[in-house]
């Protein structure tokens, strides 16, 4: 793929990720646990990871976290999201690299790791490890949302792979 075409696709996917972030901010998804989200933007990140590459996925993920944080959140949301995004993307990249896992499995484990990354940063920010009491609930939430996002990403990637 040419560099110009690659940049154009990245711009489109960044815009799509920001739209997903905005839509997600409008959805009232609260079950008593702070920070629990659906993770709609991870569909875009997973598609980029599988269709374009790792470098592009990291670049898009960092840009998305920073821009969405400034547009729809605050500095703490950027800090928590960045930790979760980098840990989950790293785990998803390593799982994908093995070639032994399907997109749904990679996404599910990415969702779980995203929550672990956020909890780890939260424990440092509040200087209290008691936030890990949320871990069982967040593991379940990460599993469910990661699974749903993985199913969606798998279906979408089957349809968009031909463009790459």
Image: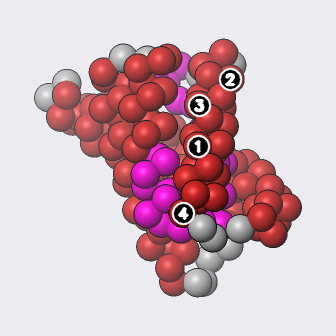
Q: Position of residue 110 (x, y in %)?
A: 52, 56
Q: CA distance from mark 3 to mark 2?
A: 9 Å
Q: Residue furthest bottom?
A: 99
Residue drawn at (62%, 35%) of the image: 15
Q: Position of residue 24 (x, y in %)?
A: 64, 25
3 or 1: tag closer to the N-terminus: 1
Q: Position of residue 119 (x, y in %)?
A: 34, 38
Q: CA distance from mark 2 to mark 1?
A: 18 Å
Q: Secondary structure at mark 2?
A: helix
In the picture of the structure, the residue carrying the numbered disc 4 is 3
Residue drawn at (58%, 84%) of the image: 99
Q: Which mark is residue 110?
A: none
130 left or right, relative to 21: left
Q: Which residues are magenta?
A: 32-61
In the picture of the structure, the residue carrying the numbered disc 1 is 11
In the picture of the structure, the residue carrying the numbered disc 2 is 23
In the picture of the structure, the residue carrying the numbered disc 3 is 18
4 or 1: tag closer to the N-terminus: 4
Q: Answer yes or no: is residue 140 visible.
A: no
Dot 1 surroundings within 10 Å: few (below 14), some, or many (20 or more)?
few
Q: Is residue 150 above or below residue 138?
A: below
């Amino acid at each position: 793929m040419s560099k110009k075409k690659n940049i154009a696709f990245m711009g489109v996917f960044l815009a799509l990720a920001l739209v997903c972030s905005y839509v997600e901010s409008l959805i009232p998804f609260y079950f008593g646990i702070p920070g629990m989200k659906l993770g709609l933007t991870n569909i875009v990140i997973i598609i980029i990871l599988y269709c374009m590459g790792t470098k592009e996925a990291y670049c898009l993920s960092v840009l998305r976290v920073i821009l969405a944080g400034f547009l729809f959140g605050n500095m703490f949301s950027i800090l928590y999201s960045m930790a979760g995004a980098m840990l989950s993307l790293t785990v998803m990249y390593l799982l994908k690299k093995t070639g032994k896992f399907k997109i749904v499995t990679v996404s599910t484990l990415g969702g779980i790791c995203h929550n672990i990354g956020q909890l780890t940063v939260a424990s440092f920010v509040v200087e209290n490890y008691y936030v890990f009491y949320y871990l069982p609930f967040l593991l379940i939430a990460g599993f469910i949302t990661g699974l749903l996002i993985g199913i969606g990403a798998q279906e979408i990637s089957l349809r968009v792979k031909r463009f790459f």
